[in-house]
Image: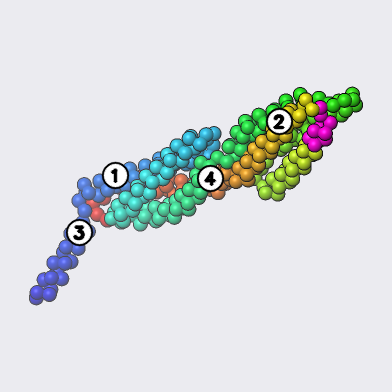
Amino acid sequence: MRLRHIIATGLLGAVVACIKSPETALQQLVEARRLSADLLVQFTKAEDASNRSVMADTDEASISFAREAEQSLQAIQTNANTLKPILSDLGYSTESGLLAEFNSRFADYRELNKTILQLAVENTNLKAQRLSFGAAQEAAESFRQSLDGVTATDSANDAWRLKALAATAVLNVREIQVMQAPHIAEAGDETMTRLERQMSSAEAEARDRLKTIAALASPSSRSKVEAAIAALDHFIATNAQIVALSRRNTNVRSLALSLGQKRTLAAACETSLQALQDALAKREFTATR
């Protein structure tokens, strides 16, 4: 008798535990709908902030948008974790399946987005571009100006030859400058390697011409020749920084991932969230599971 009483009491407790008041069921359904709607809102915000981080033209803006994206992603994870037991408690197997589908897709999305944001905040292509338009341009102009002031030692023939050599040396530097932009924008290693070979060839020609200029220049122009050599050295050193930054290609790579793989994953996540929201919208208020 005692054993039967214990079993009966346990079964009664289980039955009672399974029964919900209409108010409790209503509250849970309302909360599930709120959470599912907020999941979609937060996901849209995260996607927008991530894209703005990739497209930002300063380190500060890129970092700020990346932080904003991460906050939304964390809110999504929190909401999904909160929603899961509610759906289970309500006995909504279809919605639970849709949430599980979203969680799987979201895990892949978040992992890829983390890589994209890490690349985006480095901004190596933008930094290379700034160097190209800034320090490299200044060094190239200093090189040209120094050579403009160099005069020949004696004959008129040497003077004309000196001018031709100076103009060609400046042209060599301009060739390197012209190649910086396509190198910064290029995504392929093979093309970048070809551009770097052309840069090295132009540098070698410029240095050869400087040697001849130094031999033809008058003693009074010695300081200008040395200034031209120093300007060329500075330009080439700056160009090496540009190439190194460009080789990392963080802006190009983050943009390519955003427009390709991430867009596909984002669309899949949004599809799951919309389906979850639609399914919950069709649910009627019920007192039990």
| Span shown in magenta | 209-218
Secondary structure under the numbered disc 4 in the rendered image: helix
Q: Which mark is residue 119?
A: 4
Pointer 2 or 1: first along the chain: 1
Q: Badge 1 is on which residue?
A: 30
- Which image quarter holds the C terminus? bottom left
Q: Residue at x 20, y 51 (%)?
A: 21
Q: Residue at x 48, y 35 (%)?
A: 60
Q: Amino acid at mark 2?
A: Ala
Q: Badge 2 is on which residue?
A: 227
Q: Badge 3 is on which residue?
A: 17
Secondary structure under the numbered disc 1 in the rendered image: helix
Pointer 4 or 1: first along the chain: 1
Q: Quadrant of residue 130?
A: top right
Q: Is residue 61 visible?
A: yes
Pointer 4 or 3: first along the chain: 3
Q: Amino acid at mark 1?
A: Val
Secondary structure under the numbered disc 2 in the rendered image: helix
Question: How busy is the neighbourhood of tag 1: few (under 14 within 10 Å), some, or many (20 plus)?
Answer: some
The mark lying in front, picked from 2 and 1, is 2
Pointer 3 or 2: first along the chain: 3
Q: Residue at x 77, y 37 (%)?
A: 206
Choose between 61 and 142: the one closer to the eye.
142
List x then y, in percent, for residue 83.
33, 50
Pointer 3 or 1: first along the chain: 3
Choose between 116 and 263: the one closer to the eye.
116
Choose between 185 and 163: the one closer to the eye.
163
Residues at discs 3 and 2 in contact (Cβ within 8 Å): no
